[in-house]
Image: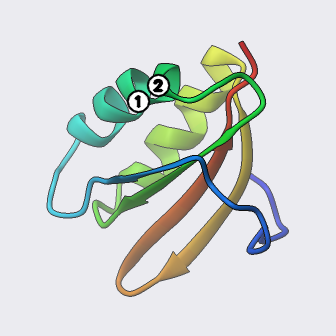
Amino acid sequence: MPERIETTLEPAKILDCRGLYCPEPVFRTSEEISSVAVGDVLEVLADDPASESDITSWAKHTGHELLSIEKRDGGFRFLIRRTA
């Protein structure tokens, strides 16, 4: 899990998954990552406690770069760079 928080990156797209529960945030992230260009960043907002481990695992399995996980507003902010 990344330790640093990348707050200066400008995401190409923001995906709001707040109010959705497992496995919906991972499914939507998987769909939306293909809508940004390779090298661009997708920001994902989620408040499901399982999303931290789910999105971390998804990024590891798909090869996309999880740049940061930030805990805020009772949820999480993920920055994911599309790699392929």
Classed neighbour count for the residue bearing mark 1: other residues with Cα under 10 Å, few (<14), some (14–19), many (≥20): some
Horizontal side of residue 16 vs 71, given as left or right: left
73 in relation to 12, above or below: below
Task: Please provide percent x and percent y for residue 20.
Answer: 16, 52
Horizontal side of residue 84 vs 77, given as left or right: right
As drawn, the residue found furthest toward the bottom would be 73
Q: Name the residue tied to disc 1.
A: 32
Q: Quadrant of residue 83?
A: top right
Q: Name the residue tied to disc 2.
A: 35
Q: Secondary structure at mark 2?
A: helix
Q: Quadrant of residue 9?
A: bottom right
63 in relation to 9, above or below: above
Task: Please provide percent x and percent y for residue 66.
Answer: 70, 43
Task: Please provide percent x and percent y for residue 32.
Answer: 40, 30
Q: Secondary structure at mark 1?
A: helix
Identified by mark 1, the residue type is Glu
Identified by mark 2, the residue type is Ser
Q: Residue at x 62, y 17 (%)?
A: 61
Task: Please provide percent x and percent y for residue 57.
Answer: 57, 32
Horizontal side of residue 75 vs 24, given as left or right: right
Mark 1 → mark 2, Cα distance in angstroms: 5 Å
Q: Residue at x 46, y 68 (%)?
A: 76
